[in-house]
Amino acid sequence: MIKKISLILLLLFILFVFITSMSSFSDIYNNAGKIFFSQNGYTDTGSVNLVTGIYLDYRLFDSLFEAAILLIAVSGVMLISEHTIDEKNATFMIDKQKTPELFVTFSRILYPIMLLFGIYVIVNGHLSPGGGFQGGAIVATAILILYYIDIRKTVDVHRVLTIEKFLFLGLVVISSLSFFTRGELFTNFIPLDANIEYKAIFLTSMNILIGAKVALGLVAIFTAFLKEGR
Amino acid sequence: MAKFIPILFIFVPIISAVIIYLIKNKAITNIVFLTQIILIFLLGYYAYELSRDPSISIIILGGWNEKFAISLRNDTLSLLFVGLTIFMWTMVLFYTFKTNSKYHKYLFFLMFLEGIFLAFLQTNDLFNLFVFLELITVLITILLSFKKNGPSLKAAIYYLLLNTLGAMFFLIGIIILYYTYGSINMTYLAENISTHAQKPIIKFAYMMMIAGASVKAALFPLYTWLPRAHGVAYTSLSALLSGLLVKGGLYLFIRVHIYMFGYQTYQMTEVLFYIGAITALVGVVLALSQKDLKQVLAHHTISQVGIMMMGLSYGYGLSYYGGLFHLVNHALFKSLLFLCAGLIIYEYKTKKIYAIRGVFKSMPLTSIFLIIGMLAISGAPFFNGYVSKTLVKYSFKDVPLKMFLFTLINIGTVTSFLKFSQILFGDRVKLEKRKDSKQFISIITIGLLCIVIGLFYKELGMFIFNIDFSYVKLFDFRAWLDYLIYIAIGYVLYKYYISKDYKPIRQIREYQITFETANYLFIFYIAFLSLMMYYIL
Amino acid sequence: MNPILSFIVILIGIYGLAISKNIIKSVFCITIVEAGTILLFLNFGAYEGGLIPILTSLGLDVVDPLPQALMITTIVIGSTITSLALMLCIKIFHHYGSIEWKVIFKGDK
């Protein structure tokens, strides 16, 4: 009891410090980043959606390592979920499922609609809200809805992991192509003063690769949880 | 063309890691040695080019305006760390190289970690630093849980949750800095931070970033993940964890406290010094009570990090360079001790100190280097520990309280290594020898490097830092006398108190800090720092 | 006002971490802390009348797009950490039969 009271007092003290510091915040707020991106973003990167322009052109280096962390997490989850002999309490959910008929019917209707919507969000990442990461999550959900239709039809996870590593190598190669055409690394390989429609080639191909990678990664993680190493 | 070598530093290990995973052939795993040779060659070439032409040290990725794009930057500090990283990884790969099929994945994660750590050291952008921090956390969690037995999983989840919390606090600091200055480039912030530095919200950001760096560096209330992690890791991973990845937290601390904010902006030197001193004392007291070979070394890491913090908190002068030098030396002799301990544990098949006897007669080569490591860590003259510990003492040699604390820490270190050296005495034990001679290459190299640095520190100090280290004298009579007095006091303390294993010592050893208590201590640490910064200073 | 509410969410998450006795609850609290951090970042820059950063013509008053790009990365990182932690929880349950912090760490010395 005394521990909880002292904990709440400490947290209230930190909150008090934060509130008193925030009072001086509105007069030192700086707009320089916003002005730079809204003036130069469209002409530099060729994408109407400024957020896509930032994570695929100004900060491409970040997005490469975000794809890398997905790669590592999927490999790690697969590694940990393999079974060893000395486990005493393992029970498997996969033997006990019987999906109701209603779910199966609706999943059959929803699956193509969700897949199409996911692909639309990926490909149109530079013209409307969306992009590789968001669309990849939607495509992953669409593939996972197949588990409602037939629970025995699972994905071969080792092949998925291999394809994912090739996709990561592909991402690194396309990002470094700009070294040969423009002399700078990790940016769009179309030259800076070309027509704006040509710059969208780079953006669309990067979005498709990232979307495929994210979708495969999430499907692999969910399958590892479902099978628990079987 | 030499400008783009830092990118190669990052991607050569990563690509070789992916190749090892994809081609499941035993002969391909020799590619790790090729990678290390390429990296050493590139480092030499880059250092030569940099000394001729200092303008190639910054790469702006994409060629955009410097304030809004990611850039990579190399200066003396980061090149020193890069060289240390490549050297340590080469030694560890010699030690642990086996071409079983199970070890494919271990080498994959290990080489990926090398690439990510090299990127962490060179980046100039704060959010990039956060992404690499989280990547290192995830990689070490997977490597810790590699054995997949019960204790490994417990240590892994404890490590993951605590370090993620620390990284989230680091992110809050980054948020506040972005909205105040409009940019998250470290060079731009280092030049312009003094315009708003005394506003309360910037002090809050500083405090959050220091709290996040302290979790990674295992300072006083937040060190509890380190002993658990060392108890379950493979020996090669223990050597890397203690030798290099804890120093990553100190590297973050140097960048935030000294490079970006300036060490005299907030007058926090005294507070940080005492946090380091308490860390060192707690580490030594806990190390005296342990019975397991690797846990003694793990608790010693905590106390040596405290000594480094005592030196680094000054920010300038010989104490700062002493702390930095101790960082390099500690990586060398701690990994030497861990590798020798790994060999001993493999032969004797037990980890308890009282069950291992007669190492000196059964494994002579290993025990010689073990003695070199023990002399180096306790600060004997002619070895490198002596140089760095004397340098750290420079700025406070006139303050009696601080000298008293430092002397206590040294006595504790010597005592616990006297206890550790009990494994050397005794009769010869019959063992089956391991048939891997590559392991001895790494032990011999590190041991010889300890002695070389201990003798030639003046030339090294001039070459790397341009600082004169002649405050440290090799044949100083008082220093020799101090060391012998420490050994005498330590021997008395050990014989009559510690070896009897009285009840307080057993209670200290068995006291475990649970996860909830660790979080409670974290909140207490933040409240303490904010009290210091806002109301007392 | 909005940044202060986001900070309160972060503090609730930390409070939960310090008193939860179950591993799954601790993982949930880390998710709450991470969600609070993302809200904090976005709330500092939002203001009344700001438009979304999709330019249909130049010169309009849009919200800062950089925080949103950074937060996409943070959300992905948070989800990977949650999945890794939950897989470790499942394996701990298989080994020890319970997921309370006290029971798991009882046998340690």
Image: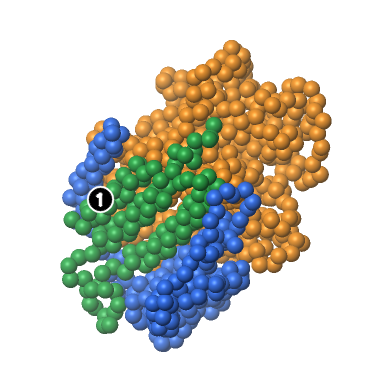
Q: Quadrant of the N terminus of chain C?
A: bottom left
- The chain that appears blue in the image is A
Locate residue A16 relative to residue B294 in the image: left or right.
left
Q: Which residue in the structure is indicated by mark 1?
A: C8
What residue lies at 79% left-to-right and 45% top-to-bottom? B436
Answer with the quarter of the image where residue A166 lies.
bottom right
Q: Residue at x 18, y 50 (%)?
A: A23
Q: Position of residue B92 (x, y in %)?
A: 67, 47
Give amino acid for label 1: Ile
Q: Secondary structure at mark 1?
A: helix
Q: Chain of mark 1?
A: C
Tell me the colour chain C is drawn in.
green
Q: Nearer the viewer, residue A105 or C53?
A: A105
Is B119 above or below relative to B320? Answer: below
- The residue located at (69%, 56%) in the rendering is B102
Residue B146 percent coordinates (x, y): 60, 51
Where residue B508 sits: x, y (%)?
A: 49, 25
Q: Nearer the viewer, residue C39 or A148?
A: A148
Q: Residue at x 48, y 73 (%)?
A: A147
* Residue B71 vertical position relative to residue A46 in the rendered view, above or below: above
Crowding at dot 1, Cα within 10 Å, few <14 / some 14-19 / many 20+, comes out as some
Pinpoint residue B319: horizontal percent, then vertical percent.
Answer: 48, 33
Residue B26 in view here: yes
Colour that chain B carries in the picture: orange
A174 sits to left or right of B165: right
Is B191 placed above or below C79 here?
Answer: above
